[in-house]
Image: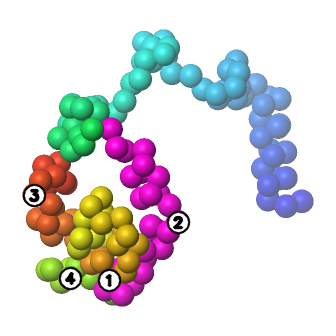
């Protein structure tokens, strides 16, 4: 008998001798107690006061997110980022930090120059701090 069958047989014997399973009486997914969750209400993680959404966010640009989000989640964009990171040897080109949390920064703005969005020569690797310095207009980026 393998180790799993031995364990399974041992557990079966324990249950026959009066041990009750931890999930006895529950059906499907475990549920929280009635006071912890209210049906149909978003609970969140308490970050809402720090990261306002929509028009209240400091980076609001008038509802252009779906188009830009689709582009930034595309495989072409991911490949562009990887090429930029690899070319720069995963090193911030401003301060020299190696590794860590890096951003692929567009030298000419992503939104203003659509033809240069995926041009590798229009990208540079920056750490989070240096990237925030490049974008002083994005107030929320500097809080990272």
- Front: mark 1 or 2: 1
Whole-angstrom CA distance, mark 3 to mark 4, is 18 Å
Answer with the quarter of the image where residue 102 lies.
bottom left
> Is residue 28 or residue 51 the one in the foreground?
51
Could you tell which of marks 3 and 4 lies nearer the N-terminus? Answer: 4
Q: Residue at 19% x, 66% y: name it.
A: 131
- Front: mark 3 or 4: 3
Label disc, if present, on residue 93 of the rendered structure: 4
Q: Which residues are magenta?
A: 63-88
Could you tell which of marks 1 and 2 lies nearer the N-terminus? Answer: 2
Label disc, if present, on residue 121 of the rendered structure: 1
Q: Secondary structure at mark 2?
A: helix
- Front: mark 4 or 1: 1
Is residue 72 inside the magenta stretch?
yes
Whole-angstrom CA distance, mark 2 to mark 3, is 28 Å
* Residue designated by label 3: 136
* Residue designated by label 2: 75
């Amino acid at each position: 008998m393998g180790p799993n069958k031995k364990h399974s047989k041992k557990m079966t014997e324990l249950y026959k001798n009066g041990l009750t399973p931890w999930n006895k009486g529950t059906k499907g997914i475990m549920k929280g107690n009635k006071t912890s969750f209210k049906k149909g209400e978003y609970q969140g993680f308490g970050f809402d006061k720090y990261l306002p959404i929509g028009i209240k966010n400091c980076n609001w640009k008038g509802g252009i997110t779906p188009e830009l989000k689709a582009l930034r989640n595309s495989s072409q964009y991911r490949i562009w980022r990887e090429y930029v990171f690899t070319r720069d040897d995963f090193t911030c080109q401003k301060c020299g930090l190696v590794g860590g949390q890096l951003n692929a920064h567009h030298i000419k703005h992503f939104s203003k120059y659509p033809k240069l969005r995926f041009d590798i020569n229009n990208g540079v690797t920056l750490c989070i701090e240096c990237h925030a310095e490049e974008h002083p207009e994005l107030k929320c980026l500097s809080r990272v």
